[in-house]
Image: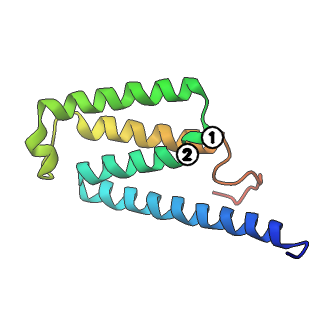
Amino acid sequence: MGLDEPNQLTYDLRQEYAKQLGELRLGILLARKDRDYKMWAELLDSLYIEVSTKLIDEDEKEYIEKITKMNEIIEKNPKPYHNRKEVPGLYSVLREINIWLNKKMDKYKMFGAKETFDGL
C-alpha cells in the first residue's frame, strides 16, 4: 500500500457519502414536489439515519418528538397517506422535519465547512 492510499480511500469514502446524501436530498425534493407523503417521510428517515451519527443526544430527542407527531397524524388518516392524498397537518409536520434536518446538517457542517460568500 502506497503512502497516499489511505488518504485516497478516505477521500473516496467522503465523496461517496456526499453523493449518497445528494441523491437522498434530490429524492426528498421530488417527493415533496409531488406531494408523495409516504416517500417523503421514508426519504427523510433515510437522511436522518445517514446523518444521525453527527448529532448529539438532544437532537435525537427532538427528532423522536417530531416523528411521534408525524406518526400520530398518519395513524389518524392512514388511507390518504398511502394513496398520495392530502392528510390534514401532514405536509406541515413533514416540512418541519425537513427544515429541522437541513438546519442540523448546516449546523454540523455536513454541507462543507468552507466559509464563502457567493452573493446569494
Q: Residue at x 27, y 41 (%)?
A: 91
Q: Residue at x 32, y 27 (%)?
A: 68
Count residues near mark 1 (Cα–Cα under 10 Å), then give few for <14, some for 14-19, many for 20+: few
Residue 107 in picture, x, y percent from top left: 64, 39
In this rendering, the answer to whether 13 lies above or below 68 is below
Quadrant in which the C terminus is drawn: bottom right
Q: Residue at x 52, y 49 (%)?
A: 50
Of all residues, the one furthest to the bottom in this rendering is 2
In the rendered image, which residue does mark 1 sit on?
A: 54
User: The residue tagged with tag 1: helix, strand or loop?
Assistant: helix
* 8 sits left or right of 30 in the view: right
Three-letter amino acid code of the residue under disc 2: Val
Which sits in the foreground, 42 or 27?
42
* 33 sits left or right of 120 in the view: left
Mark seen at residue 28: none
Question: Which quadrant of the figure has residue 55?
Answer: top right
* 55 sits left or right of 97 in the view: right
Mark seen at residue 51: 2
User: What separation in Å lies between label 1 and label 2 (alpha carbons)?
Assistant: 6 Å
Three-letter amino acid code of the residue under disc 1: Lys
Which sits in the foreground, 52 or 110?
52
Count residues near mark 2 (Cα–Cα under 10 Å), then give few for <14, some for 14-19, many for 20+: some
Quadrant in which the N terminus is drawn: bottom right
Labels 1 & 2 near each other (Cβ < 8 A):
yes
Question: Which quadrant of the figure has residue 117?
Answer: bottom right
User: The residue tagged with tag 2: helix, strand or loop?
Assistant: helix
